[in-house]
């Protein structure tokens, strides 16, 4: 008899999950990976009973320890490999179309864990498929042809996509029931979820007579057909796992970390479901739900696209984006593991509903990566909750990287690729565009106040924006923000903006006692005054997205 560590993990995750645009196919692949630990634990229970221990499991991986003879241990490994290569319809998913790496290592504790990680990493690299070159505008699609392609009789898609679509549709409700431990029966929630990104934002004829939002005129035109992709990643959670492994060779700390994180995630998912259910019960509006014209089922305009690990992705209509961001950061604000605060970086991309989800996810992920470079006020801990937002009117997202896009947008004509000050300028602009998670609610309130009767007219806002754009750069590389006395120094472009604002305030009269500080929103994360031009740009960008349902006076019901 000997001690063994068995590990499995998913391979080629992104290329497998986000290789298509169909929401149900993405959900089917994502949940198959997420449920793989349930399958592995079932196989190990069948083989070993309760004689194994879970060290930890995540969105697409798991590590377990047990005691057995070498022959029995290898039988367990073969049983796991076999199960992960076969379909498990109606339960854990279509594993036959997924890629997994497994490892069986003799030993216990930290050394065996690290060896199993190394083996799985090597197998994953060996099995990785080279990706196809990304299609860019103006290029010729490789292999473009018009004649019929081989396919299974009666099916216009491959077996892999067909199985993922079927499993994804089946798991719309079951995912929430399984993760919240409320059972796996259909009907655990009084509403269902959609199968289509376009249906998340669908308004118009399909909802005639069912609520106020059946008329597109209830929402600003800029919000029509827009979806919001909210991508978030835990700050240095991987480093904390490593610290837990290093601190306790028996891996007891790692087990505690995994259990605590699972408990916190379950609480977050419960809050999200409660947020949706409250709107369903009070019949607030069609903003959160729609009635499917084919089967009469009420479906939520919301999708949990990725769940279970450090990264999470949620998709919703553009008009719910800021409200969801506020909910998310309010929930995670109090998270702690092992006495340390847990924080998240988030990227919110609002774009056309037909934008490829892979592109929207990649751009939101780039914002998350940029936030992780910000200096932390508590470097010994996890960091802080922060978010960045980008909104796109065009179907086509920027083809370059995020830095090039921001340089072109905010420093037009002032920065070249070879400019030595470009990295410093980009770092400062990145900081200026960051929003503290705890400030999301205040930001919403501030903008909503400006939209009120005694607020600031949109026409004046765009007049400010026009002047702010003339200089070509929203945040100057050589800007002097503070004088020797510590007071803020107005640059020339800021003085022009101040004058426009003062002229309007004088004309508006005493009942609109606004100051320039009323249009500076809660940024940046370091607490210093933001560049005024960036304040105006962000205010104009977010104006229509702040409480648009309340502004439209909508009170219809989807039920």
Image (tube, rainbow, N blue to C red):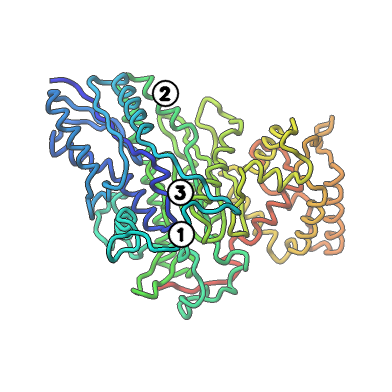
In front of the other: 3 or 187:
3
Above or below: residue 351 compared with residue 130: below
Name the front one of labels 2 and 1. 1
Upstream in sequence: badge 2 or badge 1: 1
User: Separation of disc 2 and disc 3 at Cα?
Assistant: 26 Å
The answer, for residue 408, to whether it is visible in the render is yes
Upstream in sequence: badge 1 or badge 3: 1
User: Separation of disc 1 and disc 3 at Cα?
Assistant: 34 Å
Within 10 angstroms of label 1, few (less than 14), some, or many (20 or more) residues?
few
Tag 3, which secondary structure?
strand
Q: Residue 461 appears at what percent x and percent y?
A: 76, 59
Above or below: residue 502 compared with residue 128: below
- Name the residue carrying label 2: 243
Q: Within the image, what quadrant is residue 5 found in?
A: top left
Residue at 16% from the left image edge and 25% from the top image edge: 67
Residue at 19% from the left image edge and 27% from the top image edge: 66
In front of the other: 221 or 535:
221
| Quadrant (top left, top right, bottom left, bottom right) of the C terminus | bottom left
The answer, for residue 168, to whether it is visible in the render is no
Upstream in sequence: badge 2 or badge 3: 2
Within 10 angstroms of label 3, few (less than 14), some, or many (20 or more) residues?
many
Residue 145 bears which disc, if any? 1
């Amino acid at each position: 008899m000997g001690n063994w560590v068995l590990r499995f993990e998913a391979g080629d995750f992104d290329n497998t999950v986000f290789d298509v645009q169909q929401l149900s196919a993405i959900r089917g692949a994502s949940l198959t990976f997420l449920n793989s630990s349930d399958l592995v634990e079932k196989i190990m229970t069948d083989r070993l009973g309760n004689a194994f221990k879970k060290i930890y499991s995540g969105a697409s991986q798991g590590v377990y320890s047990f005691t057995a003879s070498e022959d029995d241990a290898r039988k367990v490994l073969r049983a796991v490999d076999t199960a992960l290569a076969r379909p498990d319809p109606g339960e854990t998913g279509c594993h036959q179309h997924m890629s997994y790496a497994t490892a069986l290592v003799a030993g216990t504790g930290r050394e065996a864990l690290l060896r199993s990680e190394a083996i799985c990493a090597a197998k994953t690299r060996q099995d990785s498929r080279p990706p196809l070159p990304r299609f860019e505008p103006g290029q010729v699609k490789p292999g473009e042809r018009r004649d019929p392609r081989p396919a299974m009789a009666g099916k216009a898609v491959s077996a892999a996509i067909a199985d993922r679509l079927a499993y994804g549709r089946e798991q719309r409700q079951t995912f929430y029931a399984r993760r919240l431990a409320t059972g796996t029966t259909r009907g655990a929630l009084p509403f269902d979820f959609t199968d289509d990104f376009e249906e998340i934002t669908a308004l118009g004829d399909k909802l005639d007579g069912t609520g106020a939002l059946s008329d597109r005129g209830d929402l600003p035109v800029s919000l029509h057909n827009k979806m919001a992709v909210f991508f978030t990643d835990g700050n240095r959670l991987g480093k904390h796992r490593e610290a837990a492994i290093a601190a306790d060779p028996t891996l007891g700390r790692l087990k505690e970390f995994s259990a605590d994180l699972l408990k916190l995630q379950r609480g977050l998912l419960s809050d999200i479901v409660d947020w949706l259910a409250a709107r369903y019960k009070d019949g607030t509006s069609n903003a959160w739900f729609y009635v499917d014209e084919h089967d009469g089922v009420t479906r939520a305009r919301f999708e949990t696209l990725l769940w279970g690990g450090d990264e999470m992705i949620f998709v919703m209509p553009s008009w719910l984006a800021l409200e969801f961001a506020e909910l998310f950061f309010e929930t995670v604000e109090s998270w702690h593991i092992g006495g340390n605060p847990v924080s998240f970086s988030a990227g919110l991309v609002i774009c056309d509903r037909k934008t490829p989800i892979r592109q929207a996810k990649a751009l939101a992920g780039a914002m998350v990566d940029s936030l992780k470079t910000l200096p932390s006020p508590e470097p010994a801990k996890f960091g802080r909750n922060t978010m960045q937002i980008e909104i796109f009117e065009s179907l086509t997202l920027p083809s370059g990287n995020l830095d090039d896009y921001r340089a072109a947008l905010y420093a037009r004509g002032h920065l070249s690729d070879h400019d030595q000050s470009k990295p410093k300028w980009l770092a400062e602009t990145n900081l200026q565009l960051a929003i503290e998670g705890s400030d999301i609610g205040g930001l919403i309130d501030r903008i909503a106040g400006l939209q009120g009767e005694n607020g600031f007219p949109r026409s004046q806002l765009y007049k400010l924006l026009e002047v702010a754009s003339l200089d070509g750069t929203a945040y100057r590389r050589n800007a002097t923000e503070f004088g020797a006395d510590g007071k803020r120094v107005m640059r020339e472009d800021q003085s022009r903006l101040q004058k426009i604002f003062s002229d309007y305030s004088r004309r508006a009269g005493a009942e609109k006692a606004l100051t320039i500080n009323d249009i500076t929103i809660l940024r940046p994360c370091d607490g210093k005054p933001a560049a005024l031009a960036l304040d105006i740009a962000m205010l104009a960008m977010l104006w229509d997205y702040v409480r648009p349902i309340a502004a439209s006076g909508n009170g219809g019901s989807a039920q």
